[in-house]
Image (spheres, rainbow, N blue to C red):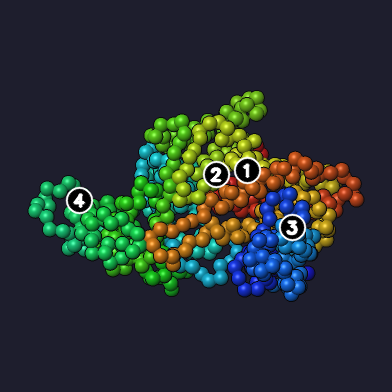
Amino acid sequence: MATGRLGIEETLGALNAALGPGGPVWFKETRSRHLRARDFLAPRRALEARFGDGQVPERVFHAVSDLQGPGVAPVLRCAPTPAGLALQLQRSAVFERVLSAVEAYAAPAAPATPGPRVVLHCPALRAAPCALRMSQLRVILVADHLARALHAHGVSVCLVPAVRDPHMSTFLQQLWVDWPATSERAETESLRIRALAELSPAGDRGALPPGVLGSVCLKDLLEERGHAAGYDPNLDNCLVTEDLLSVLAELRAALLHWPEAVAPRAGADSCMVVHVVSCQEEFQQQKLDLLWWKLDDQAPLIQKHLVCGSVKVAGAPGTLTAPEYYELRHVQVCKASALKYSRDLTEDPAWTETFRILSVATIKFEMLSTAPQGQLVLALADSSISTKGTKSGTFVMYNCARLATLFEGYKHSMEQGLYPPFPPVSSLDFSLLHDEGEWLLLFNSILPFPAVLSQAAALDGTAAGLHIAARTEMVCKSLVKLSMDFSSYYNRVHILGEPRPHLFGQMFARLQLLRAVREVLHTGLAMLGLPPLSHI
């Protein structure tokens, strides 16, 4: 049997190459009604544009039918249809390749070359938690998720600032945000000396408020590198304060003091600083960028801004804080559970952690399911935390618990002697997986998952301009889609059937498929900082 991880992108690349010179034509099908007949399609109009009369040369049919290469899925048939050139894969072979190496598909694809070291700077973490705005909470969750995705890809990441407020540390732990803490301040004396030398002339500096050193002119830097990069043209002066110098000192320390494992690559030219900020904070952060270049000769060559859009909360005052939002969601989760089980479970210690997980899952899926650059509109109604709402974090966690219950049920039945132990995967017959829901799970969620993780960690530091885009919504969307397809399949197909030997082959093949679903789900939840649920 062929080895190596199959990939959607690799298969699409080989298909487009088989058509000859020109742009991409093939696309992957996702809808169940189309997947009944085909897995990939080259649309008729695109073929007409490529080949004139739309007649696909015989050599193309041969090239597509004999498609091979690293990561390329095996082809069963390729045939012309009214919609275009339709291709179907050897599905039993794809099932076997994927489900024989489940761990490989629940992990990110290895990057071709190591990327730069990344300093992730999240200024919102300097705020007091009791006054943390909703837009700042979104920024913090985006930064935490991005850090996890980068770590999973082997990128060396340094997180700034280390949190000094113990109340903020407690709130972050409540949200499963993994961020460093410290009680120390970085040394600022060398920056202060440089700043004093750069201060604009002033009549009487003694009249300045406490903590303010004076003003530094940024016009020269703005003209040198700011205009082309997209900095605000109004950034002509910056008021230098002790707090601002402390921020720069933290950033400089992060840049210069990396672990020994990455020390050989140390230096400003091998590091990218990404400032994750809300749209309200960006103007101040642009000032800080230019000031850093002004006062520090070792400032990084690449500074990028990941600007998160505003958060609008329907039906709530604009003063709603992040802790208040958490408490609201927590109350709603407890209320929904009381309605479901007809009793109040808030005093039951066994449910305390479950309620916390569901509350945080609701918040993270709400905050992270939208591309970070776009505006986010939240509805605070109780329906947001229902297990029946297919796009909520609660729905995803509910299906995580259903999977845990399924495998616990198999284990219990096996211990009672109803089912035999799970056989070696190499002995399973995956041709018994012919339900359309099984192919939906594998083709739409499991097979593309490594690429989803790669997209979530993609940061293009070489692109021109100040701003950088991130796809931190990819994991949430993937888990929601996986949960929807699993829920539909689970409600329709009885996995643990009658304990009859002639049915065990299909049961074990299905359980192996759902093992892959579970691994993908757990990996995705870990990328969001969420533990899996075993019951709900």
Of labels 3 and 2, earlier in sequence is 3
State the residue position of label 2.
Answer: 365
Of labels 4 and 3, earlier in sequence is 3
Q: Nearer the viewer, residue 113 or 335?
A: 113
Q: Residue at x 81, y 58 (%)?
A: 430
Pointer 4: residues within 10 angstroms few (<14), some, or many (20+)?
some
Q: Viewer-nearest of labels 3 and 2?
A: 3
Q: Which mark is residue 396?
A: 1
Of labels 1 and 2, earlier in sequence is 2
Q: Position of residue 365 (x, y in %)?
A: 55, 44
Residue type, numbered disc 4: Val
Q: Position of residue 305 (x, y in %)?
A: 39, 57
Residue type, numbered disc 1: Val
Of labels 1 and 3, earlier in sequence is 3
Q: Viewer-nearest of labels 4 and 2?
A: 2
Q: Position of residue 266 (x, y in %)?
A: 40, 70
Of labels 4 and 2, earlier in sequence is 4
Q: Give the residue at the far left of this rendering.
A: 203
- Asked if the residue at tag 4 contacts the one at tag 1, i.e. Cβ–Cβ closer than 8 Å, the answer is no
The image shows residue 257, relative to residue 205, as above or below, that is below
Q: Give the residue at the far front of this rendering.
A: 53
Whole-Å distance between the Cαs marked 1 and 3?
A: 38 Å
Circle 3 SS class: loop
Residue type, numbered disc 2: Phe
Residue 476 located left or right of residue 12: left
Q: Nearer the viewer, residue 104 or 50?
A: 50
State the residue position of label 3.
Answer: 82
Circle 1 SS class: helix
Pointer 3: residues within 10 angstroms few (<14), some, or many (20+)?
few
The image shows residue 293, relative to residue 342, as above or below, that is below
Whole-Å distance between the Cαs marked 4 and 2?
A: 41 Å
